[in-house]
Amino acid sequence: MHPEPVSPTLSGARTETEDGGDGTRPGTEPGPNLLARDLDELVSATARVRAAVESVVSGRPGLAEVTVAVLLAEGHLLIEDVPGVGKTTLAKALARSIDCRVGRIQFTPDLLPSDLTGVNIFRTATHDFEFRPGPVFNNVVIGDEINRASPKTQSALLECMEEGQTTIDGTTHTLPRPFLVVATQNPVEMEGTYPLPEAQRDRFTARLTVGYPDTDAELQMLDRQESSDPLDHLSPVTTGTDVARYAQAVRTVHAAGAVKQYVLALVGATRQHEGVRLGASPRASLQLLRAAKATAAMAGREHVLPDDVQTLAVPVLAHRLILSTDSRLGGVLPEDVISEIVQRTPVPGGRVSVAPAAGSFARPGRERGR
């Protein structure tokens, strides 16, 4: 038996059928701080970024939207799939659509933590140490095949991703803003890979899979790359400074108490589910709400709707779960668990909730639409 769903409305909060007193439903009240001018500019800029990404990686709906939402939420993105489906291309397309500093790390088994963060070099001429920064000192850091490096090297990113800084030889260095890590990895079943530790996975706001394109999209890819690489023709459509400003504006998007309770109900249900050994952390609640705010702002709204939360539930929560042995032996995927939780958790306003199909963000090797 499944545990009873947690109600997103606590004592003292509005009930699911109450309105806001002015005819609005819970979760639809406007935010007082996000100026209409800033919102219009944000909508226009993010639409250009999504269009730029989709011009290179087409036929995979939803990828660009979630990718830009993670960027505005000041989070980090993990892209997991089999080789050759466009993981690195997606990361490069996002980086090139923004006029900012971009660093790239090719993870290999012999990579050292100092290859990521930087190193102090002793200069005999000055008899002093000089700091030579590593590739993490960029606005967008592309980490290719992150799970081919040893866990020790992977852990060098923990402080960078969580605190926006890195400590080297006892000295703390602040990283530039915005700071986004877009990491790609192959499925752990592939040869020569190390599974990401739980703490590392939890630092990623969302995990996406690119998936195989349909026939039409693959034909478009052949046509586009027949004479040149479309990445070579991709120009920046916004700046890193503007992205940092948009991220600050996203923080002012209003989330009603009932919507926050809904987020907590979804995350809390992962900790109570009988098929889950380790549920989502409080960091997951925070990142789910921030990503939902970003999605609302991209849609031109100053308030978060439950739909925003539902759209992001699978990509934000699924990679954080550790399933029980019985679930794994039974072929259950984390995406299936999150979709089930979204289906049975009451929604503010009493609307029927429909989770994204598991195939929309399916694990590599799982047939879409199944």
Image (cartoon, rainbow, N blue to C red):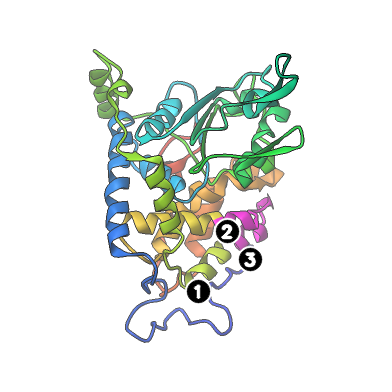
Q: Residue 121 is drawn in which quadrant?
A: top right
Q: Position of residue 178 (x, y in %)?
A: 48, 43
* Residue at image point 28% right, 39% down: 51
Q: Is residue 206 left or right of residue 354?
A: right
- Kind of residue at disc 2: Ser
Query: Which image quadrant: the C terminus?
Result: top left
Quick one: quadrant of the N terminus? bottom right
Can residue 32 be seen in the rendering of this structure? yes
Could you say whether the residue bearing mark 2 is in a helix, strand or loop? Answer: helix
The circle drawn on residue 3 is 3
Magenta-colored span: 267-286
Instruction: Please state which of residues 157 and 203 is positioned toward the viewer in this rendering.
Output: 157
Q: Earlier in the sequence, mark 1 or mark 3?
A: 3
Q: Secondary structure at mark 1?
A: helix
Pointer 1 local density, CA inside 10 Å: few below 14, some 14–19, many at least 20 = some
Coordinates of residue 63 in the picture (x, y in percent): 39, 40
Q: CA distance from mark 1 to mark 3?
A: 24 Å
**Mark 3: which secondary structure?**
loop
The residue carrying pointer 3 sits among few (fewer than 14), some (14 to 19) or many (20 or more) residues within 10 Å by Cα, namely few
Q: From the viewer's perspective, is the residue at label 1 or at label 3 nearer?
A: 1
Q: Which residue is mark 1?
A: 257
